[in-house]
Image (tube, rainbow, N blue to C red):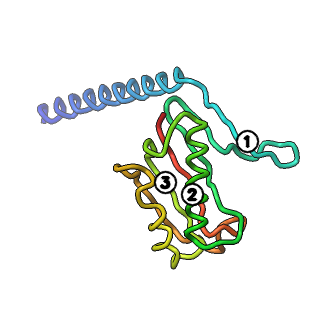
Amino acid sequence: MEKMKRRNTIKKIFASLAGVAGISAVAKANTSVSQSTEKEAFSIVEEQDVPLFSGATKQGNTVYIAGKGAHFDGDIKAHTDHVLKELEKELIKAGSSMDKVLKVNVYLHDLSDYKGMNEIFRGRFGSKPPVRTTVATYGGVPGDSLVEMDCIAYI
């Protein structure tokens, strides 16, 4: 009985120490985040003189590019080409490039456009393409675009 009490006490002590160590690690992680450079926003879209969203933001060595669409008549291949060129322009403005893209989200108006979008998408991000999520949106993509894409890259 005495051995069990000692074991339980020792377990409680180790659990407490592990908890303190975990809190310490979180505190250190939070400190390193707060010491990084401030977020830089550019290509800000305003509606009625109030900022609505940024076309791109940078935090440290990471850049986030907002969704780009194609707002003209055309097929999925023309829209995909236009959207990829718009992403590339924003990446260059932010000091990055298509080769440095880590993640792309693709939103299709119609899933039947998947194959045509892939034909144009293939090879646009260099020999090591980013990870990608592709979904067909219920109700379509805003602005009557057949495709919209956003991405995350490093600088």
Amino acid type, residue under disc 3 in the picture: Val
Indicate whether 109 appears above or below 16. below
Label 2 Cα crowd, 10 Å radius (few <14 / some 14-19 / many 20+): many
Residue 111 rendering spot, x and y as whole percentages: 52, 76
Residue 54 rendering spot, x and y as whole percentages: 69, 43
Residue extending furthest toward the bottom: 112
Residue 131: quadrant of the picture: bottom left
- Please give left or right for residue 142 compared with residue 86 in the image: right
Amino acid type, residue under disc 2 in the picture: Met
Residue 137 rendering spot, x and y as whole percentages: 59, 70
- Name the element at disc 2: strand
Distance between mark 2 and mark 3 Cα atoms: 7 Å
Indicate whether 72 appears above or below 124. below
The residue at the point 25 percent across, 28 percent down is: 14
Residue in the foreground of this view, choosing between 90 and 108: 90
The residue at the point 70 percent across, 41 percent down is: 43
State which quarter of the image contains the N terminus. Answer: top left
The residue carrying mark 3 is: 104
Indicate whether 15 appears above or below 99. above
Q: Of marks 1 and 3, which one's residue comes earlier in the chain?
A: 1
Looking at the rendered structure, which numbered label has been put on residue 149?
Answer: 2
Q: Of marks 2 and 3, which one's residue comes earlier in the chain?
A: 3
Looking at the rendered structure, which numbered label has been put on residue 44?
Answer: 1
The residue at the point 52 percent across, 29 percent down is: 60
